[in-house]
Amino acid sequence: MFRSSMLNVLLAVALVISALALVTTQYRARKAFVGLEIARGQAEDLAARQRRLEADLARAAQPAMIDKKARRILGMESLPAERTLYLTLHAGEGAARLAELDAARLRAGEEGVR
């Protein structure tokens, strides 16, 4: 009889321990699930923010927007046609030809100052 009551007590202790382990495991699983849902929500928010930033970047990179900001913020303006110099280089002409043209332009500018 003593053995059977000792066995019953041992089985009851094992049952309580396994029940506590089950409750602890379920709590940890719920906590992990909540963390996963929070992370998913943050991932969706970040993806939406990335799409907004990419759209803003595409809009800001348009030439019209760059021109508008250059005029408004930096006070820049377009040069008149008479102050524009167009260079045409043919294949084989290189840095030496560019240097010649630049020197000629500088000489012409100095003569206009005198």
Image (tube, rainbow, N blue to C red):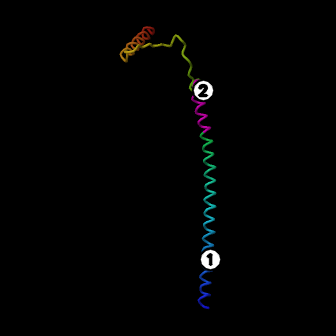
The alpha-carbon separation of the residues under discs 2 and 1 comes to: 72 Å
Closer to us: 4 or 23:
4
> In the rendered structure, does residue 15 fall within the stretch colored magenta?
no
Q: In what element is the residue under mark 2?
A: helix
Q: In what element is the residue under mark 1?
A: helix
Give the residue pinned by disc 1: 15
Percent of width and height locating residue 98: 39, 15
Circles 2 and 1: CB distance less than 8 Å?
Answer: no
The quadrant holding residue 20 is: bottom right
Stretch of the chain drawn in magenta:
51-69
Percent of width and height locating residue 76: 56, 22
Point 47% across, 13% down: residue = 86
Residue 100 falls left or right of residue 1:
left
43 above or below 83?
below
Give the residue pinned by disc 2: 65
Could you tell me the amino acid type at mark 2?
Met
| The C terminus lies in quadrant | top left
20 above or below 111?
below
